[in-house]
Amino acid sequence: MPGPDPHDDTSREYEQFEKELLAQDRDAAGGDTADVDDRTAQHLVNDLVDADVVTPVPEDKVLVHEPSGTTFDSSTQLAVFHRGWTAGRDADAEAE
C-alpha cells in the first residue's frame, strides 16, 4: 500500500490555521479597556438597557447581558464584553 501523496499534505496549512486561532484567542482574552472610560461605558450600558440588551438587577447590583446570559457588576466590564461579543458575532456573520 503506497504512502500518502506528498502533494495532498495539508499539515502545514493546518498548523498555520491553528496558530492564527491561538493568536485570536490571545487577543480576545486580553481585552483592552483603555478606550472605554467610565463615562463611555455608562452611555453604552444605558443604550443597551434602553434596547433591552442589558437588564439591571438592582437588588443584586449587577447587570445581565441578555444575549449571552453573562452577569457583570461593572458597567466598564460589561461595555468591553459587549464590544467584543458584537465583534465576534459580526466576524462569524462575515465568515458565513
Image (tube, rainbow, N blue to C red):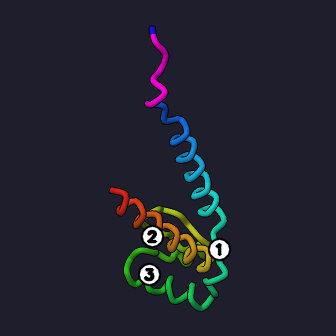
Marks 2 and 3 close (CB-CB < 8 Å): no
| Secondary structure at numbered mark 1 | loop
Q: 73 or 17, which lies in front? A: 17
Q: Position of residue 83 (x, y in %)?
A: 51, 74
Farthest residue, direction left: 96
Residue type at the position of mark 3: Val
Residue at horizontal 64 percent and vertical 58 percent from the top? 26
Give the mark, 2 or 3, whose residue is nearer the N terminus.
3
Residue placed under numbered mark 1 in the picture: 32
- First in sequence: mark 1 vs mark 3: 1
Q: Label 2, label 3: how many angstroms apart (C-alpha)? A: 16 Å
Between 25 and 15, the one lying in front of the other is 15
Label 3 neighbourhood size at 10 Å, few (<14), some (14-19), many (20+)? some
Residue 13 pos. (x, y %): 51, 42
Q: Is residue 55 magenta?
A: no
What number is the disc on residue 86? Answer: 2
The answer to whether 84 appears left or right of 48 in the picture is right
Q: Where does the image place residue 67, in percent across and percent down from the top left? A: 42, 65
Q: Residue 23 sits in which quadrant?
A: bottom right
Residue 47, located in which quarter of the rendered image? bottom left
Task: Between residue 83 and residue 17, name the one nearer to us.
Answer: 17
Q: Which residue is mark 3?
A: 49
- Residue at figure coordinates x 41%, y 74% from the top left: 53
Amino acid carrying mark 2 in the image: Thr
49 versus 65 height, above or below: below
* Residue range highlighted in magenta: 2-7
| Circle 1 Cα neighbour tier, 10 Å, few/some/many (<14 / 14–19 / ≥20) | few
* SS under mark 3: helix
Front: mark 1 or 3: 1
Q: Quadrant of the N terminus?
A: top left
Marks 1 and 2, how far apart at CA: 15 Å
Element type at marker 2? helix
